[in-house]
Amino acid sequence: MFPAVDVRQVCKRFGSLQAVDNVDLRIEAGEFFGLIGPNGAGKTTLINLLSGLARPDTGQLSILGHDVVTQYRDSRRLLGVVPQELVFDPFFTVRETLRLQSGYFGLRHNDAWIDEVMHHLDLDDKADTNMRRLSGGMKRRVLVAQALVHKPPVIVLDEPTAGVDVELRQALWRFIQRLNREGHTVLLTTHYLEEAEALCNRVAMLKRGKIVALDSMKNLLKSVVACRVLLRLSGDLPAVLLPQMIERADESYLLALSSFSALETVLALLREANITVLEMDLQQPDLEEVFLQVVGKS
Amino acid sequence: MKTSFTALFYKEVLRVQKVAFQTLLAPILTALLYLLIFSHVLEQHVEVYPGVRYTAFLIPGLVMMSVLQNAFANSSSSLIQSKITGNIVFVLLAPIAYEEFFAAYVLASVVRGLVVGAGVYLAALWFAVPPMLHPLWIVLFAVLGSAFLGAMGVVAGIWAEKFDQLAGFQNFIIMPLTFLSGVFYSIHSLPDFWQGLSRFNPFFYMIDGFRYGFFGASDISPWFSLAVVMACFMAMAAFTLALLSSGYKLRL
């Protein structure tokens, strides 16, 4: 079986800027995959290369086994892209926009699915409204609907929730998660790391066009620090625990733990030193920490 | 016929219809103003073909000028608007072959050119009724001429990065070529030098061949004009297709 997305040794340069630098990436069918990185990391360029909006200088990209350059018609039929920019055609209503988009993908009678997509994105009462009259959030919903209008097996969402309200975010993620459960592969780029953490099974981190980390969410979170504990103590931290200390504020100490079981050792050492734990807060690492650590390191 | 092509063609025609006041009615009114002024000033002074009133002579020229200018305006303005607002991305993300892209934009330009041309003709009948001796020649030159200009509009729309550049293309290339193509006169009334120069203007052959369809008379053989117009269209089509296939200014 072909991977949903296969990127092999792809490079893309714009003048002196190496936007994508020898990237290898394989996303299996059915994955919910996150692509994260700082601004200018090359996320959108990589998406543009996958969707045919840009052409690679070297390397190959394919969607479900179809090369995006030599078999572009097949690969584009399999791909639905929500672009980052809030773009729209000011001449048409929402329904006209979605019907035209269906037509571009070779679908003539697609109203049942158009209605369903509009319903899930809460666009029913805007069907006959001109695109110009929609708010920014509503226009963003139409962009999502346009990407889904041909039921693509691979869905690419390039910062789909940038600047949209909580209500849309939740409705959008419910709908996308449903599509993912039904077998659609989802590739998401986002600046909201908590979104990637909540939704993605695997994540790739990009920096200056290179992949600097690529693993399952679980392994990435484990890779930094397993967990941390914030302790308020009755006395000074014993010297033997000082190497684990990350921060100190008055009587409180933030310690790094290699695993949850290491907490037992810490508590035993405190008991030996006759120090009482006044307060304790166990903290899980989040993707943001992983991101900062990985991107900072590379 | 491929659905992608049909959808893109339909979208282009629907766009014209949505802003019909600007795309259809305004050019008809402009052509009628030309007709009103030029026929009023020159009717008594100029007789280009024996027994043909100047106003009647002028009508086919104005009709064809409107056809050509509007065919160019259609594809070029649609493309530059889509590029500047960014919505061209919806077409570029879709599985539309560049031949379909070309055919949809050019055919929509032909449709707008013909509708405006028909409108100008019908409105002009109030001033004079030119004969229509060879309707097939009329249709042939109108379709080929508007297809040539539609393709040229695609090139200009792809090349231009701002409205200013497109306006330059329109004002410094399309306008002079249409005005100096024999819309308002026969090239036989020009000095030898300008007559010779006119023969390098492809618009001259479009207007002259189109006018032959009405009067059965022309400055040069309609067959020769047809060959020139066809060759121009084929060259422009090949150039446009090559441009589209390379992704020039559309795909990074």
Image (spheres, helix red, strand yellow):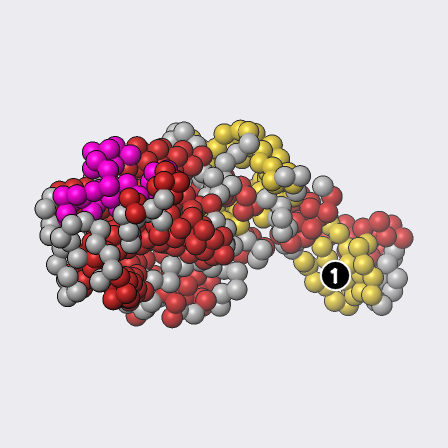
Q: For mark 1, does the 10 Å Cα neighbourhood hold few (<14), some (14 to 19), or many (20 or more) residues?
A: some
Determine whether A255 is above or below A185 in the image: below
- According to the picture, the residue beneath numbered tag 1 turns out to be A230
Q: Position of residue A20 (x, y in %)?
A: 60, 38
Side of A281 relative to B33 (left or right):
right
Q: Residue at x 46, y 62 (%)?
A: A169
B200 to A252, vertically: above or below: above
- Vertical comparison of A238 with B192: above or below: below
Q: Chain of mark 1?
A: A
Of residue A261 and residue B30, the one placed in the foreground of this image is B30
Residue A103 lies within the magenta run: no
- Amino acid carrying label 1: it is Leu
Task: Residue at 40%, 51% (x, y): give it.
Answer: B176
Magenta stretch bounds: B199-228
Q: Position of residue B238 (x, y in %)?
A: 36, 33
Residue B202 among those drawn in magenta: yes
Between A238 and A65, the residue placed more toward the observer is A65
- Identify the element where label 1 is drawn: strand
Residue plotted at (53% across, 50% down): A189
Whether residue A148 appears in this view of the structure is: no
Percent x, y for residue B36?
25, 66
